[in-house]
């Protein structure tokens, strides 16, 4: 049985492991962290990500976790609605609505689809040989070297696998803003999901199915900064006077729950998403700003397309070339769209904000369908095949 080593046990890596396992490969996930408990908060699974998960039999399970079926939209810091969106309109245009859930929930769903011994935590891995048509790829771990017919680099935005494959690539660049994220109890409060855009500032709040709320924020600040007291205190300074339920969300949070990260992305495309017998996916290949909520969805798409192209025991070279041809143009288009949206959300000048808000309100007057058109070509993606979830031989 052909073997696949997946370096990284995040959402993209685990999806790849499940998809390759269903294709009949022996999979081993090598995760540096001591557990799969993700250091993260919420994630939005869009219709394109849900269709990708359909291929491995998890799409409907995720859809059942949708917490909100109704209106939402974009607001000003004072609470005025700039534009309204509607989950039913999203479903009509793209086949389903967005599903917000905790990253840990999706990690657990994916892990449950793998054999008990498929995931090895506390195992840092270094790619030492990408392999070729005549030899397998080699990965070094604390317990020795391991070889496989296929290695998948799913080790995130600071990917060491990417650096080994393409040492000449400049890596990631700062997107111009920093984000904060948290998941807090909602206290029984009900509210419509929203994003609120200010001057160089953004806030988003979304209900989760389990009764908690996922909140995120962004600000145009220099990279590498940290609050002098706590990140929660910083959020109160920036957003404490904004509309309800933002102050209540901040009151429900603790300083330990706040995650702060500078946003970096792959501005210059890689020459390919593979080399030798190694494939890159997710942030390792095409890290993007979170402005369209597509980072995790594109990683899931990557995993499904990679497994689709993989042959049995044959040289994976042609299949990896086909994977690059499928994924590199699409993902870099989403990267560029995300970067443009990120720049729009964090406009700092008063005149720029007035112009931006007027344009959003103008589009919003035409209803949800006009707003949703901006996601054409992203959320309407279809997987290369419908499902192989139930195939006993994985073929």
Image (spheres, helix red, strand yellow):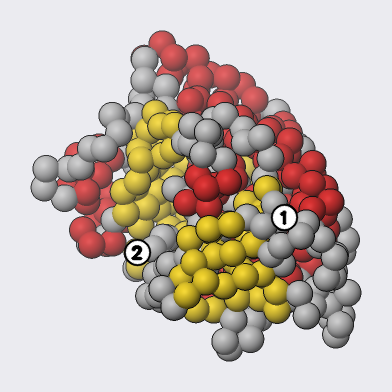
Please determine whether, in this image, residue 41 is positioned above or below residue 196.
below
Q: What's the residue at 11%, 43% (across, down)?
A: 228
Q: What's the residue at 68%, 48% (across, down)?
A: 274
- Side of 66 relative to 172 (left or right): right
**What is the quadrant of the C terminus in the image?**
bottom right
- Side of 270 relative to 149 (left or right): left
Determine crowd level at label 1: few under 14, some 14-19, many 20+ residues with C-alpha closer than 10 A: some
**What is the quadrant of the N terminus in the image?**
bottom right
Among the 4 quarters of the image, the one containing residue 308: bottom right
| Whole-percent x, y for residue 349 in the image | 36, 15
User: Can residue 37 be seen from the camera position used here?
Assistant: no
User: Can residue 315 be seen from the camera position used here?
Assistant: yes
| Whole-percent x, y for residue 382 in the image | 82, 52
Question: Could you tell me if the residues under marks 2 and 1 are in contact, i.e. CB atoms within 8 Å?
Answer: no
* Eye-nearest disc, 2 or 1: 1
What's the distance in space between the residues labelled 2 and 1, CA to CA? Answer: 48 Å
Mark 2 = which residue?
A: 184
Please determine whether, in this image, residue 190 is positioned above or below residue 346.
below
Mark 1 = which residue?
A: 132
| Whole-percent x, y for residue 360 in the image | 57, 25
Q: Earlier in the sequence, mark 2 or mark 1?
A: 1
What secondary structure is found at the residue carrying circle 2? strand
What secondary structure is found at the residue carrying circle 1? loop
């Amino acid at each position: 049985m052909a073997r696949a080593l997946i370096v990284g046990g995040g959402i993209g890596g685990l999806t790849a492991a499940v998809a390759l396992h269903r294709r009949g490969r022996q999979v081993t996930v090598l995760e540096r962290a001591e557990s799969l408990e993700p250091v993260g908060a919420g994630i939005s699974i869009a219709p394109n990500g849900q269709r990708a998960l359909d291929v491995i039999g998890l799409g409907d399970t995720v859809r059942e976790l949708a917490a909100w079926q109704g209106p939402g939209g974009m607001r000003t810091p004072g609470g005025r609605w700039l534009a309204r969106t509607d989950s039913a309109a999203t479903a009509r245009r793209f086949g389903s609505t967005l599903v917000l859930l905790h990253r840990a929930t999706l990690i657990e769903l994916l892990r449950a689809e793998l054999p008990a011994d498929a995931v090895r935590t506390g195992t840092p891995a270094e790619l030492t040989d990408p392999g070729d048509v005549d030899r397998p790829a080699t990965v070094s771990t604390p317990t020795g070297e391991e070889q496989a017919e296929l290695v998948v680099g799913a080790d995130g935005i600071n990917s060491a696998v990417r650096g080994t494959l393409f040492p000449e690539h400049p890596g990631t660049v700062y997107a111009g803003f920093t984000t904060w994220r948290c998941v807090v109890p909602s206290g029984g409060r009900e509210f419509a999901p929203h994003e609120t855009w200010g001057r160089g500032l953004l806030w988003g709040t979304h209900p989760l199915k389990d009764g908690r709320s996922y909140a995120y924020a962004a600000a145009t600040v220099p990279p590498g900064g940290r609050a002098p007291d706590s990140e929660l205190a910083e959020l109160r300074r920036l957003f404490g006077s904004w509309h309800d339920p933002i102050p209540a969300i901040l009151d429900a949070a603790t300083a330990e729950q706040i995650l702060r990260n500078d946003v970096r992305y792959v501005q210059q495309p890689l020459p390919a998403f593979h080399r030798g017998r190694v494939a890159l996916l997710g942030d390792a290949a095409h890290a993007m700003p979170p402005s369209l909520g597509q980072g995790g969805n594109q990683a899931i798409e990557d995993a499904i397309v990679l497994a689709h192209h993989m042959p049995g025991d044959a040289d994976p070279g042609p299949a990896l070339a086909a994977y690059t041809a499928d994924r590199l143009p699409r993902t870099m288009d989403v990267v560029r769209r995300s970067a443009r949206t990120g720049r729009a959300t964090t406009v700092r000048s008063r005149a720029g904000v007035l112009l931006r808000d007027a344009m959003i309100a103008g589009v919003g007057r035409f209803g949800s369908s006009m707003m949703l058109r901006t996601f054409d070509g992203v959320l309407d993606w279809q997987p290369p095949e419908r499902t192989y979830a139930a195939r006993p031989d994985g073929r």
